[in-house]
Image: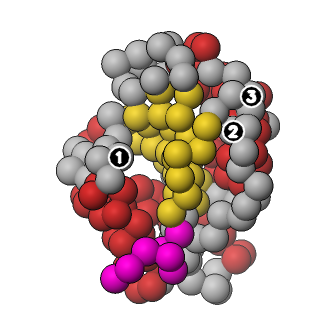
């Protein structure tokens, strides 16, 4: 089995849209990201790889998750295409290139793309992805290059407001 975890960045400041790439997280965003990442850890959902948009708010979210899930910060990868947005097919191309020794990979990025990815990769996602939310999608395959559109099963969606403090 291979597992993808799609994480929308945490809540960012509401100003600075003229420099959107560098908008940073709010205190609430930081605490929400910590809550969701801690919860995933209690469920045993631990990354073998983390790939993030390089935008400040996504990277900060990925760093919070990596800290809570004991993932080495120096192994966190950035992919600028996650900021600009990919089609589901282009994301699948990235997935096909993932290292086979990584069975659980976390992607960090932005809406609306991440909602589209959750719908396009799974056979059952119909919801929304608020900030800091994570959608865990399992694929009944042995190799990443066997992942196809709409073939994943949603293991769960975790939103900060639904996780007890």
Instruction: Specify the color scheme.
Output: secondary structure
The magenta stretch spans which residues? 159-165
Does any portion of residue 51 appear in the rendered image? no
* Residue 116 percent location from the top left of the image: 76, 48
Kind of element beneath mark 1? loop
Residue under circle 1? 45
Kind of element beneath mark 2? loop
Mark 3–mark 1 distance (CA, rounded to whole Å)? 22 Å
Using residue 151 as the reference point, say whether residue 134 is left or right of it: left
- Which dot marks residue 122? 2
- Which dot marks residue 88? none
Dot 3 or dot 1, earlier in sequence = 1
* Residue 149 percent location from the top left of the image: 74, 28
Mark 2–mark 1 distance (CA, rounded to whole Å)? 18 Å
Dot 3 or dot 2, earlier in sequence = 2
Residue under circle 3? 149
In the figure, 29 relative to 144: above or below?
below
């Amino acid at each position: 089995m291979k597992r993808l975890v799609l994480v929308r960045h945490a809540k960012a400041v509401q100003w600075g849209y003229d420099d959107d790439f560098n908008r940073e997280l709010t205190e609430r965003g930081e605490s929400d990201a910590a809550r969701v990442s801690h919860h995933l850890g209690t469920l045993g959902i631990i990354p073998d790889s983390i790939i993030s948009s390089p935008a400040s708010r996504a990277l900060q979210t990925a760093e919070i998750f990596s800290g809570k899930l004991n993932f080495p910060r120096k192994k966190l990868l950035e992919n600028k295409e996650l900021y600009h947005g990919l089609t589901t097919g282009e994301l699948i191309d990235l997935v096909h290139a993932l290292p086979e020794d990584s069975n659980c990979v976390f992607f960090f990025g932005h809406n609306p793309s991440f909602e589209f990815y959750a719908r396009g990769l799974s056979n059952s996602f119909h919801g929304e992805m608020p900030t800091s939310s994570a959608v865990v999608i399992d694929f009944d395959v042995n190799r990443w290059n066997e992942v196809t559109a709409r073939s994943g099963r949603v293991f769960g969606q975790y939103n900060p407001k639904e996780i007890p403090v």
